[in-house]
């Protein structure tokens, strides 16, 4: 069976005593937006306006949150390439030329 590679992004945010928050996202932008939302919620900050959230801004915010207690706070965004098996029925058929 042929394989297709699919991208996935995991976000892990946690503190020492609580269960870590683990989410899976289909795009990097979704993962960075989720990090921004999670840190703002943990800090009691208001949600970000509808402006675009970028990776640099979200990581700076998360780093500042972690700096308050670096021994127990952590966050990580990881990219994955997952092979997905595709049955022959799912593959596009070549059109016969006349």
Image: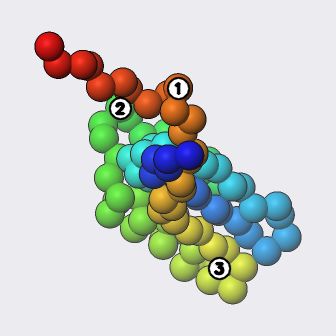
Q: Is residue 32 above or below residue 47?
A: below
Residue 12: in sight, yes or no? yes
In this rendering, the label closer to the viewer, 2 or 3 = 2
Q: Quick one: quadrant of the C terminus?
A: top left
The location of residue 51, given as percent across then percent down, is 30, 37
Residue 55 shown left or right of residue 86 in the figure: left
In this rendering, the label closer to the viewer, 3 or 1 = 1
The location of residue 4, given as percent across then percent down, is 46, 47
Residue named by callout 1: 89
Q: From mark 3 to mark 1, how far is it between C-alphas?
A: 53 Å
**Residue at point 83% right, 63% down?**
18
Residue 96 shown left or right of residue 20 in the figure: left
In the drawing, what numbered circle is on residue 22?
Answer: none
Secondary structure at numbered mark 1: helix
Q: Is residue 95 above or below residue 53?
A: above
Cβ atoms under marks 3 and 1 closer than 8 Å: no
In the drawing, what numbered circle is on residue 50?
Answer: 2
**Residue at point 44% right, 30% down?**
91
Question: Mark 2 or mark 3: which comes first in sequence?
Answer: 2
In the drawing, what numbered circle is on residue 69?
Answer: 3
């Amino acid at each position: 069976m042929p394989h297709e590679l699919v991208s996935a992004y995991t976000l892990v945010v946690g503190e020492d005593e609580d269960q870590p928050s683990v989410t899976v996202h289909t795009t990097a932008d979704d993962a960075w937006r989720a990090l921004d939302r999670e840190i703002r919620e943990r800090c009691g900050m208001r949600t970000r306006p509808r402006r675009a959230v970028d990776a640099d801004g979200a990581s700076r915010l998360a780093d500042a949150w972690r700096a308050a207690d670096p021994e127990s706070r952590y966050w990580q965004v990881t990219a994955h390439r997952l092979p997905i098996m595709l049955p022959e029925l799912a593959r596009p058929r070549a059109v016969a030329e006349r």
